[in-house]
């Protein structure tokens, strides 16, 4: 849907009913597909003809949602997975093998840190972290002949740092490597990383894309722009023995990366979501543009309110003038910086707990980025085993509260915060 704006694409891309077909995307609750000849099915198995053969590899409901997300990001193809974790895992494994390494920004989602630093390490794949204070030559020194990609998050969860996509695309491309960007918090509504040089985009669709906290899911999107023929990616440019010697770059051209990820890795690891879940995700995508606008508007108003309140020690939101990432946010996130804010209350851990317990509208949940306003206090929940010193080293103060601002009326959200602050001495 080249000519339509992104708001129209949220609603119209993907499913295209023909004359007399259902208006709404059908849920194809079928594991298998019928063919008139063994020959046709044989061609499908050899990847010589397009079509579905088994829902662990592809399904018509999923395919429509994949086409929509690819269109929203401006990519050549996408693949849905059972979670954001699975999406990041497959995106890395698609071009990395035991004995190789990759470079990642250090401020990324905690679950991704575990995946990279612990589980991938057990598979013989080493992550090398870029920390914020590193100079460009220190970053360059992380690369060697076995480095295969660069990874970062557009808006980091929960640090809320903004990725300088152009800078890291330039660094990755200088080393003939692709830049992979987890665009979960921004969504294609706020930022389209391919326009700034990223090569692969990953989503946890569990967050804003679903938007209603109903379905865990993930997605990988291929820009089709990276040239894999540079000797570093034989898994894409040399025969795949599990498909009678298919060479992905020769047979699938620009869609080589995403085709291999689907037919090899989704097939082998078995991480295809159900048609029902893809249907629910599509419902969320239909209102993504409207919800993101309200999330951003509400979050900025809440962040400004917090900044002006004398019980608040600090506020971190990239769209505040006081943010160290304000300039990056203006460049990469002109429409807003999503609904997630972090802040600290004067009085540390104790005051934070009292504040949390006093909230009436905002619920305490282990989630972010859905329609309902929610809060999390890492020091007393997800990170409660850490001492104050250990928390500080992890970049999480004992007073840090992460608030995911929903799409309720903003005055109700602010009034709830006000009354909870009144309970804090
Ligand atoms: C939540 C999240 C993930 C993991 O996604 P799941 O769907 O929970 O598996 C990955 N990256 C980011 C930025 C996230 O916020």
Image (cartoon, rainbow, N blue to C red):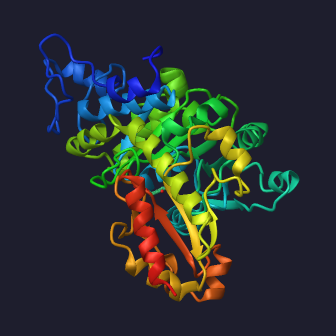
Residue 65 image point, x, y percent: 33, 33
Q: Nearer the viewer, residue 383 or 241?
A: 383
Q: How many marks?
A: 0
The answer to whether one can see residue 178 in this image is no
Q: Looking at the picture, does residue 127 appear above or below residue 173?
A: below
Q: Residue at x 35, y 24 (%)?
A: 13
Q: Nearer the viewer, residue 304 or 239?
A: 304
Q: Quadrant of ligand 1?
A: bottom left
Residue 332 image point, x, y percent: 65, 39
Q: Residue at x 55, y 61 (%)?
A: 305
Which quarter of the image is occupied by the N terminus?
A: top left
Q: Residue at x 39, y 23 (%)?
A: 8
Q: Nearer the viewer, residue 251 or 189?
A: 189
In the picture, measured across the screen, residue 222 lies left or right of residue 34, that is right
Q: Looking at the picture, does residue 182 appear above or below residue 25?
A: below
On the image, which quarter does residue 199 sit in? top right
Q: Nearer the viewer, residue 24 or 358?
A: 358
Residue 203 image point, x, y percent: 46, 46
In the picture, measured across the screen, residue 346 lies left or right of residue 139, that is left
The answer to whether one can see residue 234 in this image is yes
Residue 311 image point, x, y percent: 58, 77
In the picture, measured across the screen, residue 392 lies left or right of residue 95, that is right
Q: Residue at x 74, y 37 (%)?
A: 173
């Amino acid at each position: 849907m080249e000519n339509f704006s992104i708001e129209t694409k949220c609603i119209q891309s993907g499913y295209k009913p023909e004359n007399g077909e259902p208006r709404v995307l059908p849920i194809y609750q079928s594991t298998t597909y019928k063919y008139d000849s063994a020959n046709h099915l044989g061609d499908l198995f050899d990847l010589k003809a397009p079509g579905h053969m088994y829902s662990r590899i592809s399904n018509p409901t999923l395919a429509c949602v994949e086409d929509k997300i690819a269109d929203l990001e401006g990519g050549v193809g996408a693949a849905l997975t059972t979670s954001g974790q699975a999406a990041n895992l497959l995106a890395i494994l698609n071009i990395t093998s035991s004995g190789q390494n990759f470079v990642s920004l250090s401020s990324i989602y905690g679950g991704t840190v575990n995946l990279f630093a612990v589980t991938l390490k057990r598979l013989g794949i080493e992550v090398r972290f870029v920390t914020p204070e590193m100079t460009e030559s220190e970053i360059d020194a992380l690369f060697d002949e076995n480095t295969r990609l660069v990874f970062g998050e557009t808006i980091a969860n929960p640090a809320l740092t903004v990725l300088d996509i152009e800078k890291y695309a330039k660094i990755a491309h200088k080393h003939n490597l692709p830049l992979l960007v987890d665009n979960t918090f921004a969504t294609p509504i706020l930022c389209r990383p391919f326009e700034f040089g990223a090569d692969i985009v990953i989503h946890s669709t569990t967050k804003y894309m679903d938007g209603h906290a109903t379905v865990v899911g993930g997605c990988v999107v291929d820009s089709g722009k990276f040239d894999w023929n540079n000797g570093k990616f034989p898994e894409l440019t040399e025969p795949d023995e599990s498909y009678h010697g298919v060479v992905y770059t020769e047979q699938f051209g620009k869609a080589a990366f995403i085709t291999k990820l689907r037919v090899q890795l989704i097939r082998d690891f078995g991480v295809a979501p159900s048609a029902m879940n893809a249907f629910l995700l599509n419902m969320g995508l239909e209102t993504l543009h409207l919800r993101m606008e309200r999330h951003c508007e509400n979050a900025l108003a809440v962040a400004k309110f917090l900044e002006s309140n004398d019980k608040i020690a600090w506020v971190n939101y990239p769209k505040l003038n006081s943010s160290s990432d304000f300039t990056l946010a203006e460049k990469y996130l002109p429409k807003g910086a999503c609904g997630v804010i972090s802040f600290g209350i004067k009085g540390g851990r104790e005051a934070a707990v009292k504040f949390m317990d006093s909230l009436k509208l905002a619920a305490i949940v282990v989630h972010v980025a859905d329609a309902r306003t929610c809060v999390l206090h890492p020091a007393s929940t997800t990170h409660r085993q850490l001492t104050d010193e250990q928390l500080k080293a992890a970049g999480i103060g004992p007073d840090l509260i992460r608030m995911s601002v929903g799409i309720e009326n903003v005055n109700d959200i602010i009034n709830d915060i006000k009354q909870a602050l009144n309970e804090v001495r």
